[in-house]
Amino acid sequence: MLLTLALAACATAPAQREGGLATYDALRDAQQACAAKGLTLKLRDQGNARRLDHWSCQKD
């Protein structure tokens, strides 16, 4: 459980550092976190591609 929380904190750090913007580095890190779960990072329906919180891990 502690490891999961630590990984989640690491995954959200780029979003906070970039002010929530979907920069190349933030999207790369988010995609890697999704891939580790067997999921794919995708833009939510009617999401703003510039905002990292509008992206989510989803099944293909």
Image: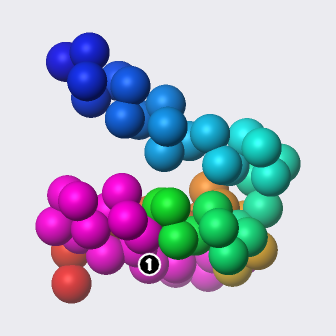
In the image shown, does 3 or 22 lie closer to the viewer? 3
Q: Residues in magenta?
A: 31-48
Q: As drawn, is 49 to the left or to the right of 19?
A: left
Q: Position of residue 40 (x, y in %)?
A: 31, 75
Q: Residue at x 16, y 67 (%)?
A: 38
Q: Is residue 50 visible?
A: yes
On whether residue 14 falls in the magenta region, the answer is: no
> Which residue is identified by label 1?
42
Of all residues shown, which one is farthest toward the right?
Answer: 19
Instruction: Please determine whether, in this image, residue 45 is positioned above or below residue 27.
Output: below
Residue 17's place in the image compared with 43, above or below, is: above
Q: Would residue 60 appear left or right of 12 to someone viewing this image? A: left
Position of residue 19 in the picture relative to residue 38 (left or right): right
| Residue in view at x 48 percent, y 61 percent | 30
How far across and how far down the image is residue 24, in percent? 68, 75
Q: Position of residue 60 (x, y in %)?
A: 21, 84
Name the residue: 63% across, 62% down. Answer: 26
Q: Is residue 51 above or below residue 60?
A: above
x, y (%) of residue 57?
A: 35, 64
Mark 1 neighbour density, 10 Å: few (under 14) some (14–19) many (20 or more):
some
Q: Is residue 44 visible?
A: no
Instruction: Count the numbered circles shown.
Output: 1
The quarter of the picture where the N terminus appears is top left
Residue at coordinates 52% horizontally, 78% vertically from top-left?
43
Residue 41 lies in quadrant: bottom left
Q: Element at badge 1?
A: strand
Q: Amino acid at mark 1?
A: Lys
